[in-house]
Image: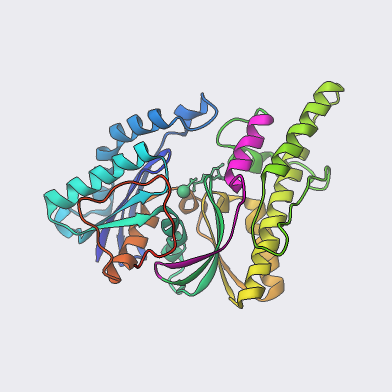
Amino acid sequence: MIILGIESSCDETSAAVVRNGRELLSDIIATQIDIHKAYGGVVPEIASRKHVEAIIPVIEQALKEANVTKDDIDAIGVTYGPGLVGALLVGLSAGKALAYAWRKPLVGVHHIEGHISAAFLENKDLEPPFLCLVVSGGHSHIIECRDYGDFKILGRTEDDAAGEAFDKTSRVLGLGYPGGPAIDKHAKLGNPDAIHFPRVHMGDTLNFSFSGVKTAVLNYVNKAQMTHAEINTDDVCASFQKAVTDILTENTMKAARQTGFKKIVLAGGVAANSALRASLKKACDKNGFKLYYPSPVLCTDNGAMIASAAFYAAQKGRFSGTDLNAYANLSIEGLNG
Ligand code: KG4
Ligand code: ZN
């Protein structure tokens, strides 16, 4: 089964062709980062307009690179939430229009389900059940993946998402948008033990809170500026990153011990973070867990992860009608009905 996957929930317009949920035939990603950089973050209205410009060329390129035509496509998978509603509507409208014109089944995909499915593209042996840490610009979740499309949230952020904390901290340090890659780069040159930023534990739960560490960096920078003390940006980045990765690793290990899962999947844009990958790998090796994480390009938003998720949704008979709408908020629980 060959699926065309379409993603437009935030600032990447992407289309990909994937065979049987695992074999990547093409993955075209048109990023808008350079446009939003000037504003220090994603401007929803601009994102929608840029998606409109990019969507058709991106889809055409995905088919061309995969060396397929519309006749080879068996279904169209498209993100319908959560995300920026105006941005989502562009990809969704394109997906619905193609499904109608080409007479192909349509599969609505949950964005986070997509992120988790990115791991299937490079790990052919990976099958549910497993535990998953999903960390992106909008989400930080520890999820039990019981089967394809069958998820239970075990822990979540109570305020900022991990990626949001990276982006806001980067802004405080004047490193621009998106913050994750900038902080990751500076952190490599700094000392992670130079400054102690707080690690917040939410009692017995598996929940997270990242607003405290973000504020601690802001206070540190303000204090340094008031006293004309020099700020070592590399050290601040490394210390902030360590505080975030420590708590993500700790809670994920705690969840694995509580649930008994031996397989752990790391997903979402923040999964591209080199320190988080290293920290989770070390903890998993120590505890005898197997860790899976996608290549960095498949961690951030892309159409291939949507096509992979759509394949498994189709296997479960989860098709959508052309009345499918876009949703800014959408639960990942209960997708299989
Ligand atoms: O998954 P994604 O592309 O979009 C959402 O669904 O939100 O994630 C984007 C987020 C941004 O907050 C970005 O700063 C973060 O992922 N990110 C990173 C890295 N690369 C991207 N965070 C930390 N380290 C990175 N290397
Ligand atoms: Zn995403």
- Quarter placement of the C terminus: bottom left
* Camera-side residue of 70 and 164: 164
Picture quadrant of residue 255: bottom right
How many numbered discs sit on the rendered protein? Answer: 0
Residue at position x 31%, y 41% in the image: 89
Picture quadrant of residue 52: top left
The answer to whether residue 194 is left or right of residue 306 is: right
- Taking the magenta stretch, the answer to whether it contains residue 159 is yes
- Residue 294 picture location, percent across and down: 50, 59
* Camera-side residue of 23 and 334: 334
- Residue 11 picture location, percent across and down: 43, 38
- Residue 14 picture location, percent across and down: 35, 45
Residue at position x 68%, y 68% in the image: 254
Residue at position x 53%, y 50% in the image: 139
The answer to whether residue 264 is left or right of residue 63 is: right
Q: Which residues are magenta?
A: 148-172
